[in-house]
């Protein structure tokens, strides 16, 4: 069989992209993890076909399939590109745990929109309560969603997924960047605030289905958290964080 001639496309969006959690270097031949190999088989890729790999440390590598069989797939790393599409400011989504699969949706879309960190929070009105064992399983599941969203959206750096934290304990930390609590009670909107402030690192606090309690909002403000609204309409918890990230990106010019 004649080997295919390798020609790298202008960017990694024209070929399948996969996260590879180990060091990569040009010229190396590496075996793909089983779950990545499965995707390659599903896509019916053949020896010589190009793929893009990234390891979350920045930039991406173009590789070609060196050998393909049902038990193991090897690729040869051909080129490296320092391409990055990260936002010029960090956005943390501090999300109170919602019901069912809503957190999956929030994480997936937040990663696509450029969020750099996800902080799950336990608040008074959260219906979902995670034991230590269940929290570990959820984190592994959410990490997989973040990887898939990064692969799809072209990001080469994985967002940080923090351990679930208690709301009152988390707002008591003072080594964080500006924190913004989204509440319909606030007198100023996020968009209006952003128009009058330069791009900067922020953490967006989003309540559960029933919202934050008045006591929680007061406690947050006492710790220096800034209360802002998303406008005259009350948004669902799975909408608020995504709308907030999109609003900041639009006002600060990163869409």
Image (cartoon, grey):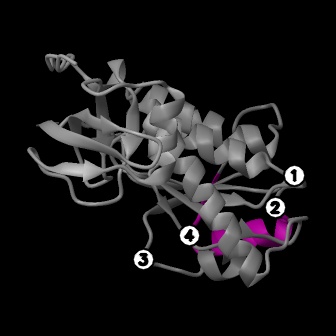
The CA distance from mark 2 to mark 1 is: 9 Å
Q: Which residue is mark 4?
A: 224
- Chain part drawn in magenta: 212-227
Q: Quadrant of the C terminus?
A: top left
Circle 1 Cα neighbour tier, 10 Å, few/some/many (<14 / 14–19 / ≥20): some
Name the element at disc 2: loop
Q: Which residue is mark 3?
A: 175
- Sequence-wise, the earlier of marks 3 and 1 is 3
Q: Is residue 187 magenta?
A: no
In the image, residue 126 above or below residue 77 = below
Residue 189 x %, y %:
64, 38
Which-is-in-front pick, marks 2 and 1? 1
Q: Is residue 173 left or right of residue 5?
A: right
Residue under the point 60% across and 42% down: 108
Q: Residue furthest front?
A: 1
Q: Which residue is mark 1?
A: 209
Name the element at disc 1: loop
Which-is-in-front pick, marks 2 and 4? 2
Please report contact status of discs 3 and 1: CB closer than 8 Å, yes or no: no
Q: Is residue 97 left or right of residue 9?
A: right
Q: Is residue 171 left or right of residue 102?
A: left
Residue under the point 45% across and 49% down: 71
Residue 10 x %, y %:
20, 17
Picture disc at residue 212? 2
The CA distance from mark 3 to mark 1 is: 28 Å
Residue 8 found in image quarter: top left
Residue under the point 42% across and 77% down: 175
- The answer to whether any part of residue 70 appears in the image is yes
In the image, residue 184 above or below residue 21 = above
- Sequence-wise, the earlier of marks 2 and 4 is 2
């Amino acid at each position: 069989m004649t080997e295919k001639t390798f020609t790298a496309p202008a960017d990694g969006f024209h070929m399948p992209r996969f996260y590879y959690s180990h060091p990569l270097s040009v010229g190396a031949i590496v075996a793909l993890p089983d779950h990545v190999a499965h995707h390659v088989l599903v896509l019916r890729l053949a020896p010589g076909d190009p793929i893009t790999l990234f390891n979350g440390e920045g930039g991406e590598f173009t590789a070609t399939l060196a050998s393909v069989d049902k038990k193991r797939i090897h690729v040869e790393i051909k080129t490296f590109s320092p391409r990055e599409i990260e936002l010029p400011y960090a956005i943390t989504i501090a999300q109170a745990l919602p019901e069912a699969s809503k957190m999956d949706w929030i994480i997936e879309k937040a990663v696509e929109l450029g969020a750099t960190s996800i902080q799950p929070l336990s608040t008074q009105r959260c219906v979902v309560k995670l034991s230590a064992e269940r929290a570990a399983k959820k984190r592994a599941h959410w990490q997989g969603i973040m990887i898939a969203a990064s692969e799809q959206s072209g990001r080469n750096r994985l967002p940080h997924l923090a351990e679930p934290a208690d709301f009152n304990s988390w707002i008591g930390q003072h080594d964080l960047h500006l924190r913004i609590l989204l509440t319909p009670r606030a007198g100023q909107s996020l968009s209006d605030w952003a128009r009058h402030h330069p791009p900067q690192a922020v953490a967006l606090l989003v309540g559960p289905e029933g919202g934050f309690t008045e006591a929680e909002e007061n406690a947050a403000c006492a710790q220096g958290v800034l209360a802002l609204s998303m406008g005259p309409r009350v948004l669902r918890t799975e909408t608020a964080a995504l709308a907030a990230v999109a609003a900041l990106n639009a006002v600060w010019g990163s869409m």
